Image: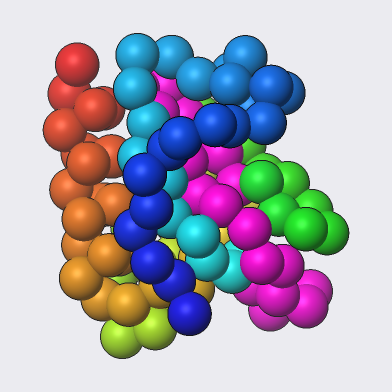
């Protein structure tokens, strides 16, 4: 189950990567070939960071070419590599994609 969370204290390795601000979602990342990993998705002014219990992912906003909202996840299409799926509800997925769209314009 995903939920919007406040940022409070953040792991120092993640904090070092943050730029101007971040929005965090506790959720799962799932690939067609891999098992889901529970963790936190951070949306910063430069990238998406997923800090999971079994894997981590960083996606530069410049590499995001498209996104798709589903009832249980958001699919992030990149200029290279396989798309990433993040489990969340549709409202959260729309929020993440809207935020990414605004941040890419600046």
Give coordinates of residue 106: x percent, y percent. Answer: 19, 16
- x, y percentage for residue 71? 31, 85
Residue 49, by quadrant, is top right
Q: Residue furthest right?
A: 54
Q: Nearer the viewer, residue 41 or 7?
A: 7
Residue 33 appearing in the image? no
Query: Is any atom of residue 34 visible in this view?
Result: yes
Residue 98 placement (x, y as % from top left) = 18, 48
Which residues lie in the magenta part? 30-50
21 relative position to 95: left or right: right
Across and down, in percent, residue 82 comes to 63, 58
Instruction: Return the residue nearer the eye: 56 or 64.
Output: 56
**Residue pictured at 43% horizontal, 37% vertical:** 7
Q: Residue at 26% across / 76% down in the picture? A: 90
Q: Which residue occupies 73% across, 46% down? A: 56
The dominant secondary structure in magenta is strand
| Left or right, residue 29 beside residue 89 | right
Instruction: Please state if 44 lies on the left or on the right of 38 as rendered.
Output: left
């Amino acid at each position: 189950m995903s939920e919007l969370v406040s940022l409070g204290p953040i792991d120092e390795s993640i904090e070092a990567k943050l730029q101007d601000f971040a929005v965090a979602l506790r959720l799962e990342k799932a690939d067609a070939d891999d098992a889901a990993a529970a963790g936190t998705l951070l949306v910063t002014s430069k990238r998406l960071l997923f800090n999971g219990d079994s894997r981590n992912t960083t996606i530069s906003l410049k590499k995001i070419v498209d996104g798709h909202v589903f009832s249980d996840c958001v699919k992030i299409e990149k200029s290279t590599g396989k798309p990433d799926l993040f489990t969340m509800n549709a409202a959260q997925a729309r929020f993440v994609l809207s935020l990414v769209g605004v941040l890419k314009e600046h």
